[in-house]
Amino acid sequence: MKGYISVRKSSEVFSFINGFLLDLAVPMSISVFWNFGILLGVVLAMQIVGGLLLSMHYHNGVVEAFDSVCFIQYNVNWGWVLRAAHMNGASFFFFFIYVHMGRGLYYGSYTFIWTWMIGVSIFVVLMATAFMGYVLPYGQMSYWGATVITNLISAIPYAGYDIVNWVWGGFSVGDATVMRFFVFHFLAPFLILLMVIIHLIYLHESGSGNGLGVKSGQMKVRFHVFFMLKDAVGIFFFLLFFFMIVLKYPNALGDCENFFYADPMSTPAHIKPEWYFLWAYAILRSIPSKVGGVVMMGLAIMVLYTFVLFKSNFQGVKFYKASQMIYWLLVINMGLLTWIGMRPVEGYYYICGQIFTFLFFFLFMLYFLSMTISDKIFELQ
């Protein structure tokens, strides 16, 4: 045992691993919501490995793409499992990252400035990666999704249409588009992996926050063995549920339109992205102006960067009752925006989308304003 400890402490490599994993001081009060960080790491590893295996059989191009996906599905040994795992893995990835970021907002993790900024940047790159991956099967919804979303670039004054044609590699979505999207989709996960490593380095320098909302320098324990076991239990239940979805309901989170080959002459009745983009899509189409919709959607994502500018007496909303209520109203509003994104753009749904879009920005402002007012009241008392 003494020899094991001496090697763990003396060797530079083992000493780094030891400080990074085993002897890392972690607040005692962190809850199950801190498990989602390790779950994101597990899903990222699964997506990279699964993507590498799928790329061995995939052929990019408007003619070959759809057929190669069918070939993977029906002719490659365990190909349907690989594809279902990769497809559903994206949904789990976004679900976990939304919970992870929601926990960070609730418990004030944005006070760790560089950790938060890099985390939001990972989210932005992940959105681009997922969108380009959705185009690769070149089904009906893939084609029209690519056409609609890339056309948003045309909202840029003067050069917008030229940039769209450059992205397409022509005057419509075609071979060059699929090739470029495939290359980016293949390389981007490694960029995400690098950003995750930097994210973890900053996290371990600043230390984790805690559920109490106060500084707890003396209330910490070693990461191993307490939190390693907790993470292991979380990973086990995630994998259990994940493979139940993959093996029993592989297409539950997909769109039936994507089972058909892309037809530029036949527009689907209702073009919509995957469920994890629906809240942003609802904001986009709630604004009558194309430019205004693009700007508002961009602001809805970029607003996450502004959280680091806010300061409060306590970390998170543990001692701010009004902000807690506003936080849960924000969560409900995000759910309603996701629901509206599934609906057609007409009458009642269009008006609801505009209301929920207004509430999205208003509640964010009110969230931080209520904390500032509470701080002033605490100081007066």
Image (cartoon, rainbow, N blue to C red):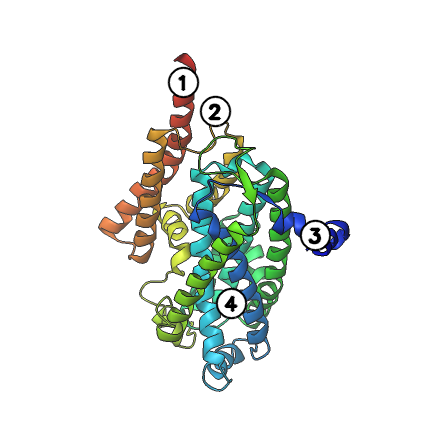
302, above or below 149, in the image: above
Position in image of residue 175 (x %, y %):
56, 73
Residue annotated with mark 4 = 173
Nearest to N terminus: mark 4 or mark 2: 4
Position in image of residue 334 (x %, y %):
35, 46
Residue annotated with mark 3 = 5
User: Answer yes or no: do the residues labelled 4 and 2 have beta carbons within 8 Å?
Assistant: no
> Spatial distance from mark 3 to mark 2, Cα to Cα?
41 Å
- Residue lying furthest top in this view? 380
> Spatial distance from mark 1 to mark 4, Cα to Cα?
58 Å
Nearest to N terminus: mark 1 or mark 3: 3
Examine the rendering and report whether any part of residue 204 can be seen.
yes
Q: Nearer the viewer, mark 4 or mark 2?
A: 2
Type of amino acid under label 3: Ile
Nearest to N terminus: mark 3 or mark 2: 3
Residue annotated with mark 1 = 378
Residue annotated with mark 2 = 313
